Image (tube, rainbow, N blue to C red):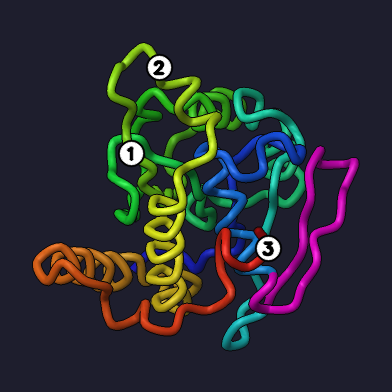
Amino acid sequence: MSLPIRLIIGLGNPGTRYAVTRHNAGFWFVDGIAAHFRQTFRGTARFFGDECGIEIEGRSCRLFKPATFMNESGLSIAALFHYYRYAPEEVLIVHDEIDFPPGAVRIKQGGGHGGHNGLRSIMTHINTSDFNRLRIGVGRPAHRDDVVNYVLRKAPLEEQALIEEAIARVYAVFPSLIEGKLARAMNVLHVEVSEKQGSGGNCGVCKDPPPFGLGAKR
């Protein structure tokens, strides 16, 4: 079992211009968590971002959104890391993933940045890649040269619905995530994705999803 998760960071770009773009899937996730626990993000100049706290089953966890742009996420997150002295294993970074289709979601412990500039910046500034990641599939553009424009565009409604469902599935295993039982959470998520793909329909947890993601505010 990994260490309990004490910090969840959603990656994205600040401002209304980028609010519903694919690159902001990490923001959608933590916004949904905060809404579910009836918490409000507040700006903090010390860490160049917005934060709030939640408590679940006796465990406290901080939610954070960098106010820097995606490619400079590490500046904000390094300030937070150094002040609170988080161990990398206590941190979950939530980000968009073009290698997965909309509706897919995966948990990963450590590894490289895979070309994601937000992760690249974080690794550079905190000098480690040992943090945990929650990768939310947003799909890949038809042409590889169009990746930047693709992630900075709004997803079609059908894709938004699939991303919402993926976020709802993660919510169902959220207590396991906070406890650091990442292997258990991964097993549940991966089985649900396989069943969903095999049946061609919605998975059981998604029949009545909580107020997460795009549908909560947008």
Task: Point out the residue furthest to the right here.
Answer: 45
Front one among 3 and 36: 36
In-image side of 32 versus 207 (left or right) = right
Residue interval drawn in magenta: 35-54
Residue positioned most to the front: 157
Disc with the residue nearer the chain's start (1 vs 3): 1
Q: Is residue 114 left or right of residue 91?
A: left
> In the image, residue 56 lies at what x, y percent?
60, 82
Q: Secondary structure at mark 1?
A: loop
Q: Which residue is mark 1?
A: 139
Q: Secondary structure at mark 3?
A: helix
Q: Earlier in the sequence, mark 2 or mark 3?
A: 2
Q: CA distance from mark 1 to mark 2?
A: 12 Å
Q: Position of residue 104 (x, y in %)?
A: 30, 54
Question: What residue is shown at x 48% (from left), y 20% (from top)?
Answer: 148
Give the tally of numbered discs: 3
Does 71 sit left or right of 101 as displayed?
right
- Report which residue position mark 3 lands on: 217
Three-letter code, disc 3: Lys
Of callouts 1 and 2, the N-terminal one: 1
Looking at this rendering, what residue extends furthest in the left direction? 198
Q: Is residue 102 above or below residue 170?
A: above
Residue 34, compared with residue 27, is above or below; it is: below
Asked if the magenta segment contains residue 42, the reply would be yes
Taking 74 as reference, is 158 above or below it?
Answer: below
Describe the element under mark 2 as helix, strand or loop.
Answer: helix
Distance CA(mark 2)–CA(mark 3): 28 Å
Q: Quadrant of residue 206?
A: bottom left
